[in-house]
Image (cartoon, rainbow, N blue to C red):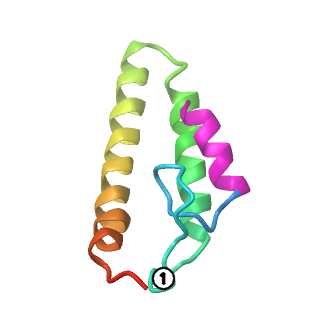
Amino acid sequence: MALVFGFIHFWYPRFAPGVPLEKRNPDWVPGGPAWGYITGAALILGAIGMLGRDTTRRKAATILGTILVLLVAVFYVPIMFAPRR
């Protein structure tokens, strides 16, 4: 699934990174669509890394999970508390 989500981030880089939802990246976030491309690359590389041996698989899964948790903390928590328009 990480591979599929990685390609989705390349096709729709304006949506908030991490979880593929229809929630757009807020205008106050610096970098704009670059976050989508970076997240897509991390997901694709993590998916490729999980095809390796046991230790490589564990490292790739740990790194990818850490990246996704940080993305949720950085993007979705402020979006959740932002005033709705």
Return the residue nearer the eye: 67 or 81.
81
Q: Residue furthest front?
A: 85
Q: What secondary structure predominates along the stretch shown in magenta?
A: helix
Residue at the disc numbered 1: 30
Is residue 8 shown in magenta? yes
Instruction: Determine whether 33 is above or below 67 in the image.
Output: below
Instruction: Determine whether 34 is above or below 29 in the image.
Output: above
Return the residue nearer the eye: 37 or 76.
76
- At 57% from the left and 76% from the top, the residue drawn is 32
Residue 51: x and y in percent read 55, 19
Q: In this rendering, would 67 be left or right of 44?
A: left
Instruction: Determine whether 4 is above or below 31 in the image.
Output: above
Return the residue nearer the eye: 64 or 9.
9
Place residue 55 in its image quadrant: top left
Q: In this rendering, would 84 be left or right of 5?
A: left
- At 54% from the left and 49% from the top, the residue drawn is 20
Identity of the amino acid at label 1? Pro
Which quadrant is home to the N terminus? top right
Around disc 1, counting alpha carbons within 10 Å, would you say few (fewer than 14), some (14 to 19), or many (20 or more)? few
Instruction: Determine whether 62 is above or below 35 in the image.
Output: above
Is residue 52 shown in magenta? no
**Residue range corresponding to the magenta coloring:** 1-11
Q: In this rendering, would 66 be left or right of 40?
A: left
Q: How many marks?
A: 1
Q: Residue furthest right?
A: 11
Which quadrant is home to the C terminus? bottom left
Residue 80: x and y in percent read 31, 68
Place residue 60 in its image quadrant: top left
Q: In this rendering, would 18 be left or right of 12?
A: left
Residue 4: x and y in percent read 64, 36
